[in-house]
Image (spheres, rainbow, N blue to C red):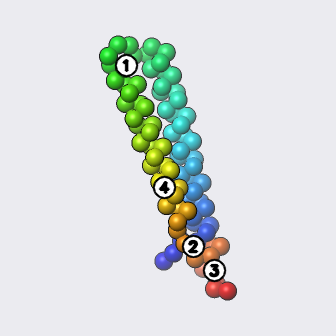
């Protein structure tokens, strides 16, 4: 069963929403660390982990959106009649 364009668009909106939430969460966490919430070696390790986590999730969101772009759709909505 192929996804409809409506389902593909809904998935895209959900992925974009999750990506935006991720960006906001990472920014807030990075600010806490950068403002000295955790100092020393532990803070440095956490900052490096946050950057790696951010890169990984950005790549994941990019790949997910690319996959959606490559999906064929069965039409505009569920049960669409062939033309």
Disc on the earlier residue, 4 or 3: 4
Spatial separation of the CA atoms under disc 4 and disc 3: 25 Å
**Mark linked to residue 43:** 1
Q: Residue 31's x, y, as percent?
A: 51, 22
Q: Name the residue under label 2.
A: 73
Tally of numbered tags = 4
Q: Does 11 sit above or below residue 1?
A: above
Label 3 packing within 10 angstroms: few (<14), some (14-19), many (20+): few
Say the numbered circle drawn on residue 80: 3
Q: Which one is earlier in the sequence, the residue at label 2 or at label 4?
A: 4
> Mark 4, mark 3: which one is toward the viewer?
4
Cα–Cα span, label 3 and label 2: 10 Å
The quadrant of the image that shows the C terminus is: bottom right
Point out which mark residue 64 bears: 4
Query: Mark 1: which secondary structure?
Result: helix
Dot 3: what SS? loop
Query: Label 4, label 1: how many angstroms apart (C-alpha)?
Result: 31 Å
Measure how far apart labels 2 and 1 are at the Cα level: 47 Å
Residue 29 lies, with reference to residue 83, above or below; the image says above
Question: How far across and how far down the image is residue 14, in percent?
Answer: 56, 53
Circle 2 SS class: loop
Is 42 left or right of 63, judged from the image as shown? left
């Amino acid at each position: 069963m192929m996804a409809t364009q409506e389902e593909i668009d809904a998935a895209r909106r959900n992925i974009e929403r999750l990506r935006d939430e991720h960006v906001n969460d990472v920014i807030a966490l990075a600010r806490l660390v950068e403002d000295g919430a955790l100092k020393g070696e532990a803070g440095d390790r956490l900052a490096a982990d946050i950057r790696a986590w951010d890169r990984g999730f950005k790549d994941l969101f990019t790949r997910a959106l690319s996959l959606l772009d490559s999906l064929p759709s069965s039409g505009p909505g569920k049960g669409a009649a062939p033309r």
